[in-house]
Image (cartoon, rainbow, N blue to C red):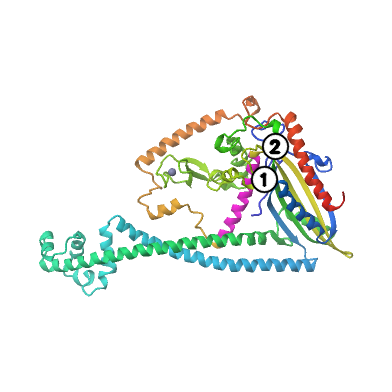
Amino acid sequence: MDKEIFELGSDDGIPMNARLPSLGYFVCLGPVAPPGKEKYADQNVELNFTGKAGTASSIYYSLFFQLPKWDWFIMKADEWIEVSPTHKEYYDRTIATKQMLESTIKTGLSSAAQAVADFELMNHDLRKYKEILNYFAKKDEHSLKAMFVDQVDVHTDVSMVRTIAPRWPTIIADFQRLSDEDVNPDEIAKKYNISKAEGVILATKNRLYKQWKDLFGASVRERYERIKGLVESRRKSIKEYRKWLKPYIARFSMTKLGGERVGTRASTFKSFADITGIASFANVIRIYAWRFLRTEETRKPAAEKKEKGFAVYPYDEYIRENLILHPTKGLARIYPWLRNPRKYCSKCNEYFPAGVVLCSKCGSTSLTDKTMADEIVEGKDGIIEQWKKGEMGLDPFEMYYMITDFNIERFGTRLPVGELEDITFKMRNFVVSQNVLLVKILELKCRDIELERYIDEILGVRVEERHISEIIMDEFPELFPQKEPSGYAKFIKELRDSGKAYTNFLKKIKAPKTDKFMFFKPGPYEKDFLERLTKQYARIAGSYFFTVVKFVIAQMGVE
Ligand SMILES: [Zn+2]
């Protein structure tokens, strides 16, 4: 929450690379000079409007209702509101809204907390029954008999522990030796070389034990199924609560009163409010809008169905290493957990926790090393999957996109003549290769994931964080000795680790990262910058962008 943006066109984010060796690996072309220095079409525009209260907001709404009609996809990256106590009415209204949000969240939280408590209780029972079912599944007569003696026999008048064992200390050991067929006292006495009297007691106990086993087995199965159903339904309702609470908590956390917000953002408000002393509220909204950019004549001949249904696969090794996972230059600088190791089974397309050595689905031991970023991008319901389905304005056959970065500042001011609203649209338009857009989408997902984690923290849920295989490990520790891979699995793991070190080394020599190596084919994207990019992509992007700019101007009524 409250994290900086991985900026387009910035050395701390995705740099403009017109003249950098990275051109070709990706493309990021955007405005160079500050607004005012360039013309409208030059991709950097600042428009300001001041009007009566409400008029500025209506421009905002009409713009973002219009954009989707022009095939732009819109995603809000950030928003914050600050209200100054100098405008009492607005301040009170905002406080009231905030309190309303707070109480809604609290009610939601207490219901959710109940669901979490239920879930944990039932999960505990579930594990207990699972363990007993295991005895039955593995025909573990020893454990079952021990349970019978401990929990059933002890309550009878002739308890083996209380009344019999003092006389026949070996009775429990003898009972453990019996098999299901041992029901005849004489035969038992003969078979195990014990007295007839003990044989009578053991025959009775064994008959009771067999009856108990049948009844108990059936009821454990039945209970297990019932609790399993309840646990699943609680798990679902926790998820539902989280989904339901998310927008409330998001709104709650973005509404800050006075100086609640830290850092650079607060200074915007300060400069406005403290100096003039008349601001009522400041509202900053950050929105990204994107749209594919097609220039028929420059479309690469390679634009045919190739890797995984894409003209060119957007999640390439260069972007992954440099703009995503790189600890100081990549998105991982802001979201370090993107680098967290994960294991991946390519056969099942499943991701597992780092310690896992075999796939719980197919049993394969050839798991590859991946990261959290890989899972978010390529895993189930990941960005690539959405991309293939054409969601979020994405098209697997397009290689270039325009992204407009909207920075909208709205201020309310109260003057003796009445209330005024002031809005500034700062718009910067970029032409990017699809892999740059992927980085931005990943960033927006990271923001979303952090919000969900924050909500989980409030709820105290750890359920979703755990992978199903971890839960299985808990339930069948003897089947999944993950901590200490032994024998074959260990051998395979060591073999693989040594092989990996070798391939990593080879990869390093192959990857040209400096100028010197640039005569190697530098990635699939345009590298003929000045010729093609400016003349064709930028011209087309400029005309789309100009349409948007003109629309805002028309809404402001100053055309
Ligand atoms: Zn598998």
Give the amino acid at mark 1: Phe
Name the residue that disc number 1 marks: 6
Residue 280 can be seen, yes or no = yes
Give the amino acid at mark 2: Arg
Instruction: Classify residue 248 as left or right of residue 116.
Output: right
Callout 2 environment at 10 Å: few (<14), some (14 to 19), or many (20+)?
Answer: some
In terms of secondary structure, what is the magenta stretch mainly? helix
Mark 2 or mark 1, which has the lower sequence index? 1
Magenta segment: 435-458
- Residue at 77%, 43% (x, y): give it: 545
Name the residue that disc number 2 marks: 294
Q: Relative to residue 286, is residue 126 depicted above or below?
A: below
For residue 516: magenta? Answer: no
Residue situated in front as seen by the camera: 244 or 116: 244
- Residue at 60%, 48% (x, y): give it: 335
Residue situated in front as seen by the camera: 115 or 355: 115
